[in-house]
């Protein structure tokens, strides 16, 4: 609640540009929390989180623009669609291990991207424009409202995930990630646990995607590509892969670094283009991965110990 209050005050005081970044950090953090549950606690690797983010966004956008459905309901339906796709994929993907599972989720992202870009019903490469925004009664949401909404949903996501990892479900997940055979000997159904966590991570991404679609008012396939999935993994690892607050820290760091480089690189290299910014961002992130193997949250925990 304190974090939500701080965000609400910041959103009111800061210029609209920074308020928009706060909203983006909140939505990316929500996706990363779901990814942390799957990667950090279930011990699996996913390179397709952007696909679930996109399914939530497209699901909500189609309902709003084609059928006049409220974005509130569209976001819920988008999250359910993401969960259904994750559930169907889990019967194949979760029987694979490590690199093969990562490749399966990567393939999902590619397939979903092709569907987004080739299916005319979804707008094809032109995407979907004029997506209605959220509203409460006669009040239409502005940037500040989206920042508060993103962090309010994030607060609920952190609270739910925190209770989950402290429950018997969370302890069973940790046991599976530490040693599947040992966990199964104790009566834990490892495949069922991984499937449930995979679906839950898709729900987190789907909810964030539904809000993102209305926040942007325009979406196209390029916004949900492989690079975004890689960014979600980086946010998870840099923040702390087995820390819920690490997901928030990681999302804030990656978004902030991108903005700082966008401003600084042209001052140092006037002829530099966007590729140079991605190059320097990649170097900085790799350095952070080497220097902070447990992520920023892990280093902060070591400092308090």
Image (cartoon, helix red, strand yellow):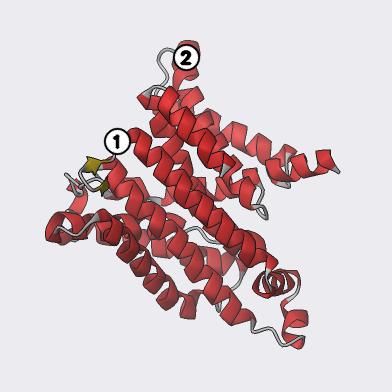
Q: Nearer the viewer, residue 139 or 66?
A: 139
Please report whichever mark, 2 or 1, sits nearer to the chain's N-terminal start. 1
The single residue placed furthest to the front in the displayed view is: 137
The label number, if any, that marks residue 269 in the structure image: 2
Callout 2: helix, strand or loop?
A: loop
The image position of residue 60, as x and y in percent, is: 27, 58
Quadrant of image for the N terminus: top right
- Horizontally, is 197 left or right of 286 in the view? left
Residues at marks 2 and 1, CA–CA distance in whole angstroms: 36 Å
Residue 50: x %, y % from top left: 42, 54
Are there few (<14), some (14-19), or many (20+) residues within 10 Å of tag 2? few
In the picture, residue 120 is in which quadrant? bottom left
* Residue indicated by mark 1: 142
Quarter-of-image position of residue 74? bottom left
Residue drawn at x 67%, y 36% is 288
Give the image location of residue 267, x and y in percent.
Answer: 47, 11
Q: Is residue 179 visible?
A: yes
Per the image, label 1 sits on a secondary structure element best described as loop
Relative to 237, residue 184 above or below: below
Q: From the viewer's perspective, is 84 left or right of 61?
A: right
Q: Would you say the residues marked 2 and 1 are in contact, meaning their CB atoms lie under 8 Å apart? A: no
Q: Residue shown at 74%/80% (left/top)?
A: 183
Q: Is residue 114 visible?
A: no
Q: Nearer the viewer, mark 2 or mark 1?
A: 1
Q: Determine the image quadrant of residue 14.
A: top left
Q: Position of residue 153 (x, y in %)?
A: 45, 51
Report the front residue among 116 and 235: 235
Q: In percent of the image, x 19 and y 49: which residue is there? A: 128
Q: How many marks?
A: 2
């Amino acid at each position: 609640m304190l974090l939500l209050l701080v965000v609400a005050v910041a959103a009111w005081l800061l210029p609209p540009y920074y308020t928009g970044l706060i909203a983006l950090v909140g939505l990316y953090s929500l996706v990363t929390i779901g990814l942390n549950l799957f990667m950090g606690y279930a011990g699996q690797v996913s390179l397709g989180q952007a696909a679930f983010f996109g399914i939530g966004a497209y699901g909500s956008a189609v309902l709003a623009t084609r059928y006049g459905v409220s974005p509130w309901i569209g976001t819920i339906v988008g999250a359910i669609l993401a969960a259904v796709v994750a559930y169907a994929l889990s019967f194949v993907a979760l029987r694979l291990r490590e690199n093969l599972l990562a490749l399966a989720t990567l393939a999902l992202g590619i397939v979903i991207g092709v569907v987004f870009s080739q299916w005319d019903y979804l707008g094809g490469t032109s995407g979907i424009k004029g997506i209605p925004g959220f509203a409460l009664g006669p009040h239409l949401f502005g940037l500040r409202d989206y920042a508060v909404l993103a962090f309010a949903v994030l607060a609920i996501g952190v609270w739910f995930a925190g209770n989950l990892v402290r429950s018997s479900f969370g302890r069973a997940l940790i046991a599976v990630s530490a040693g599947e055979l040992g966990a199964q000997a104790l009566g834990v159904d490892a495949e069922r646990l991984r499937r449930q966590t995979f679906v839950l991570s898709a729900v987190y991404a789907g909810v964030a995607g539904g809000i993102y679609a209305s926040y942007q008012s325009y979406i196209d396939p390029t916004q949900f590509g492989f690079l975004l999935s890689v960014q979600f993994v980086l946010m998870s690892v840099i923040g702390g892969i087995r820390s819920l607050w690490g997901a928030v820290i990681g999302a804030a760091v990656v978004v902030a670094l991108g903005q700082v480089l966008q401003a600084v690189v042209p001052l140092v290299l006037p002829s530099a283009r966007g590729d140079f910014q991605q190059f320097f961002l990649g170097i900085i992130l790799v350095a952070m991965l080497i220097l902070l193997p447990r992520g920023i949250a892990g280093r902060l925990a070591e400092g308090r110990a």
